Amino acid sequence: GHPLFRSALPVIQKLTVHHYEAVFVGGCVRDALAGRDIADIDIATAATPEQVLELFDHVAPTGLQHGTVTVIMGGKGYEVTTFRKESAYEAFRKPSSVEFISDLNEDLRRRDFTVNAMAMSEDGKLIDPFGGQADLRRGLIRCVGDADARLQEDALRMLRGLRFAADYGFGQEGIEPSTWAAILRHGSLLRHIAMERVGVELHKMIKGPHPDWAVQLLLESRLLENTKEKLPLTAGNIPVAWMGPSQGEQPSEVLLEPIDSASCRWAALCISFGLNPETSRSLFQALRYSRQQSDEIVSIIALHRRTVNLVVSQSHLEGDLLAENWTRITLEMGKEASQFWLEMIEQAPWLLEGDETRSLVVLLRRLWSELPVRELQQLAVNGGDILSDVRVKGGPWLKNLLFELLLDVALGRLPNEKKALLQQVRRKLEKEQS
Ligand code: ATP
Ligand code: MG
C-alpha cells in the first residue's frame, strides 16, 4: 500500500476492532489508484461522531454538523466522517441537513464524480459501485447518477469537474458527454456560489499540474461568465494565446505549465488577457485572495508593464540609459517582484513580443545579476544612521533619500560604505538648503 495509507491504517484498525466499518474514501483513493501524490487522507466510517470522539485520545470536533472529526495520530490529522446522506439542497450549494447512515454505498452515492466515489478497505479492497476505476483508466470525469440533478444540487461541482479534467490531463473530451452538457446547461447556477470558493477552485487549477488545460476548459465552458461578482477573465477578451486549434482540442501551446510559481502563473494569465495592474487587483479582490497574495501578483504585472514600456520606448537608446531606467524600476518595484518577473519571462518567453525585446531582456537579466544591492536592507546605512548624523527631524524626505542612495550604489556611482554614503547625504542636504 501507499505509505500515507500505511500511516493512517491505525485509525481505521481501531475503528474496525470496535466493529465500526471504516474505509479510506474520496480523493486519496482516486490519487492512489492514479499513482499520484496524495494531498490528504479522508476516512469514512459507520461510527457516529460521538463514538469517534470517545474512541480516540487525540481528536478534535472540526465539523460536527457534517459528521466530521479530526483524529491526530503520529503528528498527522485525519478527517473521519460518518457515512451520511444529504437530504435536501438549498440554493444550489450546501445541504440543509445531513443524515447519518450505516451504508457505505449510500455515502458514496452522494459524492460528485465516479472517480471520487470510491473507497478502500484496510486490506486494500476497492469499493467502487459506480465504475470510478474504469473511468479513471479511460480518462473520464462523470457525475454519479444524473448529471443535471447533481450539478443543480451543488453548482461548485462544475468547477471541481473542470479542475479534475485539467489536473488529470483528460481535457474536455475527458468530461463524459452528459456531464459536459449539464455543465453547459447549468453554468448560470455558479452565481449562487460564494466568490471565496470560486477563488479556491481557480487557485487549485492554476497551481495544479495542467493550468493550461484548466484555462482552456474555463473558456470553453464559459463558466466564469456566471460568477456572482463579475470577473475580467471572460470571453469578450479571450487572447489568441488561449485559442486552441479547435474546440475541445489540446491547447496549441503550453503556456502556463512551464512556469514554476503560482504567483507568476497568475501574473502571466492576467498579462495574456491584457489586464492592467488595477484590473488584476480587482480580480483578486473578487476572488477574495489575501492582500499579500494579490500584492505579490500585481507587482509582477506592474513590473512587466513598466519594463515592456521602457524597452519599447527606449530600445534605440544607449545601453547605459536603459540600464539606469530599468534599475530604477526594479528597485522601486522591489526585489521579490523583480526576481519573480525574471523567472516568469525565462519560463514564458511568449509574454514578450519580438526578438529584439527578448534580446534586451537578456541584457536586463545580466544587469540584475550584477547589481551590487537590490534592496534597502543591503545598504550600508539606514534611516537611523542618517538622522543621528545630520540631526534633522525625520520625514518622507528620508525615504526618498534612502532610495536615491540605493540607486546610486546599485548603479556603481557610490561605494556601499557608511562613510561615503553619509558624506553624500550631507552634500545633498546642503545643496537643498542653498
Ligand atoms: P482535492 O483534495 O484534490 O481537492 P478531493 O476530491 O479530495 O480533491 P475534497 O474537497 O478533499 O476533494 O473532498 C473529498 C471528497 O469529498 C471528494 O473526493 C468527494 O468524494 C467528496 N466531495 C467533496 N466536495 C464535494 C462536492 N461539492 N459534492 C460532492 N462530493 C464532494
Ligand atoms: Mg482531498
Image (cartoon, rainbow, N blue to C red):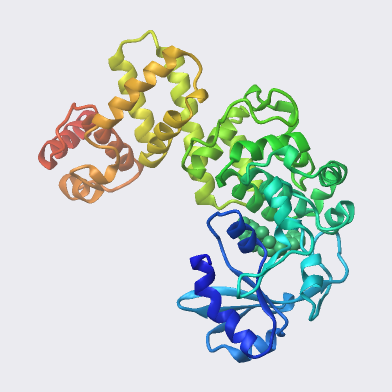
Q: Quick check: 380 left or right of 203?
A: left
Q: Quadrant of residue 173?
A: top right
Residue drawn where x is 45% and y is 31% of the image: 347
Residue 305 seen in render:
yes
Left or right position of 111 against 256: right
Q: Residue at x 47, y 36 (%)?
A: 300
Q: Can you say whether 274 is above or below 419 in the image?
A: above
Q: In this image, 364 relative to 235: left or right?
A: left
Please state the horizontal and vertical placement of residue 67, each as a whole percent of the image. Answer: 72, 78
Q: Residue at x 77, y 63 (%)?
A: 111
Query: Which one is in front, 129 or 196?
Result: 129
What is the residue that sits farthest to the left in this orientation? 419
Residue 232 visible somewhere in the drawing = no
In the foreground, 251 or 404 = 251
Query: Where does the image place residue 344, in percent across and percent down from the top left?
Result: 45, 33
Image location (x, y in percent) of residue 245 = 69, 22
Hey, which residue is sitting farthest top in the picture?
316
Horizontal side of 333 relative to 369 (left or right) equals right
Position above or below: 295 against 310: below
Tally of numbered discs? 0
Look at the picture and state if 21 lies above or below 342: below
Residue 382 image position (x, y, % from top left): 23, 47
Toward the viewer: 322 or 414?
Answer: 322
Quadrant location, the C terminus: top left
Residue at 52 percent across and 79 percent down: it is 72
Q: Quadrant of residue 398?
A: top left
